[in-house]
Image: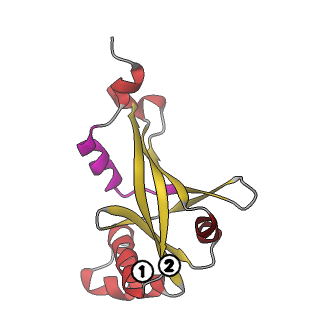
Amino acid sequence: MPKRRDQIKMSSEEIETFLHGRRTMTVATIGRDGWPHLVAMWYGFLDGAPVFETYRKSQKVLNLQRDDRITCMIEDGDAYEELRGVELVGRGEVIEDPEVVMAAARSVVQRYFGVPDDQIDGFAAALAAKRVAVKVHVDQVVSWDHSKL
């Protein structure tokens, strides 16, 4: 009999499809005091990796500059039998290059803002001001889909 964990695990294709859905990502970094710091972020993709843009002086960036460990969770579902999610464990790379920040902002705008293509750069430029990009280098993926039970 297969283990319950194996029954609910998503395939690579299912994970990819799920991550590319329009969801919010919970980002966990480690604070100066050792406690987790959690925030909800919209995210995009850069070279296939999850990326988000955020203020250069935000707590999550300060935390990543001290300790680059990051865990991200993307989930959905309201009832137990609907719960699905993906946990990404890895390292957060803080990137200050304006071109990379703009690319990250552009990806976020395309995914969440619903603006016409000819307005994406304007919205992205507003997002990119005084910000950095954080690219998630994933070392481990954990997934679950309770609808498979």
- Relative to 120, is 92 on the left or the right? right
Q: Which residues are magenta?
A: 11-26
Label 1 is placed on what type of residue?
Answer: Val
Count of residue discs:
2
Residue lying farthest to the top in this orientation: 1
Please provide percent x and percent y for residue 31.
69, 60
- Relative to 69, is 95 on the left or the right? left
- Is residue 16 highlighted in magenta? yes
Residue shown at the point (29%, 67%) measured from the top left: 47
Label 2 is placed on what type of residue?
Answer: Val
Quadrant holding the C terminus = top left
- Relative to 12, is 108 on the left or the right? right
Please provide percent x and percent y for residue 3.
38, 18
Mark 1, residue position? 101
Please provide percent x and percent y for residue 21.
33, 55
- Where disc 1 sits, the SS reads helix
- State yes or no: discs 1 and 2 in contact (Cβ < 8 Å): yes
Residue shown at the point (65%, 69%) measured from the top left: 59
Residue shown at the point (34%, 53%) measured from the top left: 19
Q: Earlier in the sequence, mark 1 or mark 2?
A: 1
Task: Indicate whether 130 appears above or below 21.
Answer: below
Mark 2, residue position? 132
Instruction: For label 2, count other residues whose C-alpha is less than 10 Å away and answer few (under 14), some (14-19) or many (20+).
Output: many
Residue 15 disc label: none
- Relative to 131, is 22 on the left or the right? left
Residue shown at the point (46%, 87%) measured from the top left: 126
